Amino acid sequence: MTASDLRGVDTYRGDRIRVESWHQGYDFAGKRVAVVGTDSHTVRIVPELTGIAAFVKVFQCAPRWILPYPVPAEFTKAPVLQWGIARLAQAHLRTQVADPWLRRQLTPDHPLEAAEMLVSSDYYPALQQADCKLIDWPIATFSPVGVRTSDGVEHHVDTIVFGDARGRDARYLR
């Protein structure tokens, strides 16, 4: 999904922020926040947002393999150790996410590739906080008040933070 695929985003009346520039003075306190996408930026900011925002909804386009921090250097340098990286990512998910349904939603259906490794020891615990929810239904459209997913649910939010390649076209963002 790219910015041009964000149907209805121009009708959204709340604040829109690029994940890369989220630290530039915006006050998330008390806000209902949607985080769209899962990338290295979003796995880093979701744990921070859960302590500030009133509620955080993470709209996951596809699950990603996440390794614990710090990753042993030998795992990232030797291709022969790819199996070790995959086992580490699987164990990390299994030990940090107790709920089998959430674990299933967070498990990618493809093998781990070194190019897509994400690293965080805080992301999975953040998703299990009372003020955070993972949404894995595809986004159907944006509306004036938030995000509508393909199951027909309209998620009312005050702010949308765009991760991945979303929001790179500045005309969509304030």
Image: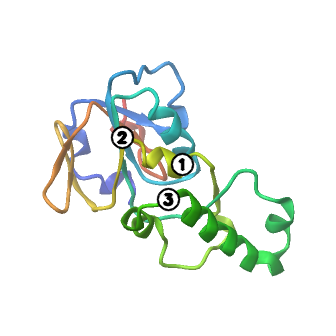
Pick the front one: 165 or 78: 78
Query: Is disc 1 surrounded by few (<14), some (14 to 19) or many (20+) residues within 10 Å?
Result: some
Q: For mark 2, what is the residue?
A: 130
Q: Residue furthest left?
A: 152
Left of 110 or right of it: where is 60?
left
Q: Are marks 3 and 2 in contact (CB under 8 Å)?
A: no
At a point 62% along the width and 62% down the height, the residue shown is: 92
Quarter of the rendering containing residue 160: top left
User: Exactly how many numbered labels are in the figure?
Assistant: 3
At a point 72% along the width and 71% down the height, the residue shown is: 85
Q: Are marks 1 and 3 in contact (CB under 8 Å)?
A: no
Query: Is disc 3 surrounded by few (<14), some (14 to 19) or many (20+) residues within 10 Å?
Result: some
Q: Earlier in the sequence, mark 1 or mark 2?
A: 1
At a point 22% along the width and 37% down the height, the residue shown is: 12
Whole-percent x, y for residue 165 in the image: 47, 52
Left of 76 or right of it: where is 67?
left
Q: Earlier in the sequence, mark 1 or mark 3?
A: 3
